[in-house]
């Protein structure tokens, strides 16, 4: 069974005449009849029945032709994508949950354009960021290193053949809803935060201090809530006066102006 044979029987079905199909395919009618017979014997089905009015497609022939059309169409898509030079380059970034990284990604896409590239962005857990870059699912990963976790993560980078390049260094900021009772204070102590829930991103099975996205991951918080995404985190800041500890580099374009650090 070949693609050419499938294309030929599809043409016969569309033409509803063996003679007309032979003309379209530039082959002789006896040759086309031989192709049909060979294909029917190989597939174990009767595709066409000849009548005085031309050909009739059998019920099992209808089913066979349905599959044949899918196969031929898939081949055409492959041909268009890989043989006509229309393959787009791919660029993917995996990151911890940082709005500044999303903003940088947006600016990069706008600058490069989407004509030649197919882009992907993955906000995910720390270990998955490393795995995505290791497996080349992503070309680039963005994550947080501190004096506490640096030795562990640098060891992981080395084991996976990865290189860490520092983007910037930063202090610790409290990120919260602008209507939070402490939002207008320029300096906030950990003692002052004890009455409010600390919000942290869940790290799944790798939920250790070393994989935490938040600063001061070893601090014993009286109240803590784990979440999976930034949208939920922002909702909890409003609903529960929650807070998180971050780099202080926030993006109003991404998160809106209802939050301060």
Image (cartoon, rainbow, N blue to C red):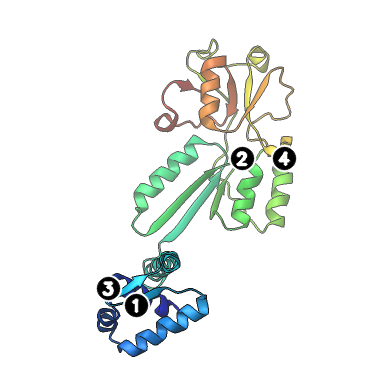
Residue on which disc 3 sits: 15
* Mark-to-mark CA distance, 4 and 1: 65 Å
Q: What residue appears at the point 68 percent right and 28 percent down from the top-left corner?
A: 216
Mark drawn on residue 50: 1
Q: What residue appears at the point 46 percent right and 80 percent down from the top-left corner?
A: 39
Element on which disc 1 rests: strand
* Mark-to-mark CA distance, 4 and 2: 19 Å
Q: In the rendered structure, which disc, 3 or 1, sits on the residue that comes first in sequence?
A: 3
- Give the x, y percent position of residue 186: 53, 16
Residue on which disc 2 sits: 144
One can see residue 82 in this view: yes
Q: Do tag 3 and tag 2 residues touch (Cβ < 8 Å)?
A: no
Label 3 neighbour load within 10 Å: few <14, some 14-19, many 20+ = some
One can see residue 148 in this view: no
For the residue pair 20 and 219, the one nearer the viewer reads as: 20
Q: Is residue 39 left or right of residue 162?
A: left
Q: In the rendered structure, which disc, 4 or 2, sits on the residue that comes first in sequence?
A: 2
- Give the x, y percent position of residue 32: 35, 85
- Give the x, y percent position of residue 171: 59, 30
Q: Do tag 2 and tag 1 residues touch (Cβ < 8 Å)?
A: no
Mark drawn on residue 187: none
Tell me the mark number nearer the camera, choosing from 4 and 2.
Answer: 4
For the residue pair 39 and 187, the one nearer the viewer reads as: 39
Tell me the mark number nearer the camera, choosing from 4 and 1.
Answer: 1
Q: In the rendered structure, which disc, 2 or 1, sits on the residue that comes first in sequence?
A: 1
């Amino acid at each position: 069974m070949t693609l050419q044979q499938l294309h030929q029987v599809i043409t016969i079905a569309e033409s509803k005449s063996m003679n007309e199909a032979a003309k379209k395919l530039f082959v002789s009618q006896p040759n086309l009849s031989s192709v049909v017979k060979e294909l029917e014997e190989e597939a174990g089905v009767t595709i066409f029945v000849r009548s005085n009015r031309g050909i009739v497609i059998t019920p099992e022939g209808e089913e066979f032709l349905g599959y044949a059309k899918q196969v031929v169409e898939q081949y055409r898509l492959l041909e268009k994508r890989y043989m006509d030079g229309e393959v787009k380059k791919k660029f993917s970034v995996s990151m911890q949950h940082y709005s500044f990284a999303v903003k940088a990604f947006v600016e990069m896409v706008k600058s490069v354009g989407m004509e030649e590239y197919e882009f992907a962005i993955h906000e995910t857990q720390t270990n998955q960021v490393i795995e995505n870059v290791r497996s080349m699912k992503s070309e680039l990963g963005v994550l947080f290193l501190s004096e506490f976790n640096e030795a562990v993560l640098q060891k992981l980078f080395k084991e996976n053949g990865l290189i860490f390049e520092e983007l910037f260094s930063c202090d610790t900021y409290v990120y919260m809803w602008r209507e939070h009772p402490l939002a207008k204070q320029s300096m906030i102590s950990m003692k002052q935060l004890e009455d409010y829930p600390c919000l942290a991103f869940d790290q799944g099975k790798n939920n250790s201090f070393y994989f935490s996205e938040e600063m001061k991951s070893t601090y014993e918080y009286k109240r803590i809530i784990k979440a999976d995404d930034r949208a939920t985190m922002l909702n909890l800041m409003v609903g529960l006066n929650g807070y998180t500890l971050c780099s202080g580099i926030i993006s109003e374009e991404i998160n809106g102006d209802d939050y301060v650090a």
